[in-house]
Amino acid sequence: MTNEKLQDIYTSVSDSIQGNPGAWQFFIKEIPMVSITDTNHNRMRIISPIADSKSLSDELIKAALVANFHTALDVKYAVSDGILWSVFIHPLKELSEHQVKDAVSQVYHAHVNFGTSFASTALAFPGTIGGDKKEGVDKKEEQPKYKKL
């Protein structure tokens, strides 16, 4: 994958786009997204700001961490500079066009599903379907099932 090819892909999937190769801002159905690449280190990321992290309850933050394991799949929820983001990070050169389009879709869906299903796709790993939706929130009495270091 190259910056030129990324620009072509982002232009084809977005409603509007601005920026230069290696740093773009684009919108999909009014959801802002940013993509940044570092060709010297073979890295890229697609990010979307969701909320001011200070405005989020501890329960929502914990639910996002659980979603990172079960329903966010190839994207993650992360906090940086006081903002909660949906984030996709990957080596740049190894990406295919299909993976970039899928990544954009997952960042978008993780953004719009924050606070509800927290899902980036229709797929969820076992442990969330029909289970306790407050997993990781009120389970202090349970002991870890791993050996402490």
Image: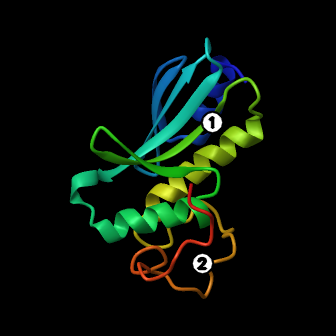
Residue 109 percent across, percent down from the top left: 53, 58
Q: Amino acid at mark 2?
A: Thr
**112 vs 28: above or below:** below
Left/right of residue 126 with respect to residue 63 in the rendered view:
right
Res. 7 visible in picture: no
**14 vs 118: above or below:** above
Residue 111 percent across, percent down from the top left: 45, 56
- Where residue 60 sits, quadrant-wise, is bottom left
Give the class, few, some or many, for how many residues have Cα within 10 Å of label 1's Cα (few <14, many ≥20). Answer: few
Q: Amino acid at mark 1?
A: Ser
Q: Residue furthest left?
A: 55
Task: Report the Cα–Cα distance between label 1 and label 2.
Answer: 34 Å
Say what secondary structure mark 1 lies in. helix
- Where residue 73 sits, quadrant-wise, is bottom right
Could you tell me which quadrant the N terminus lies in? top right
**79 vs 58: above or below:** above
Question: For the point 28% across and 52% down, which residue is it?
Answer: 53
Question: For the point 62% across and 72% down, which residue is it?
Answer: 145
Residue denoted by label 1:
12
Residue 36 percent across, percent down from the top left: 51, 26
Residue denoted by label 2:
128
Left/right of residue 39 with respect to residue 23 in the rendered view:
right
Question: For the point 68% across and 48% down, which residue is it?
Answer: 102
Camera-side residue: 91 or 47? 91
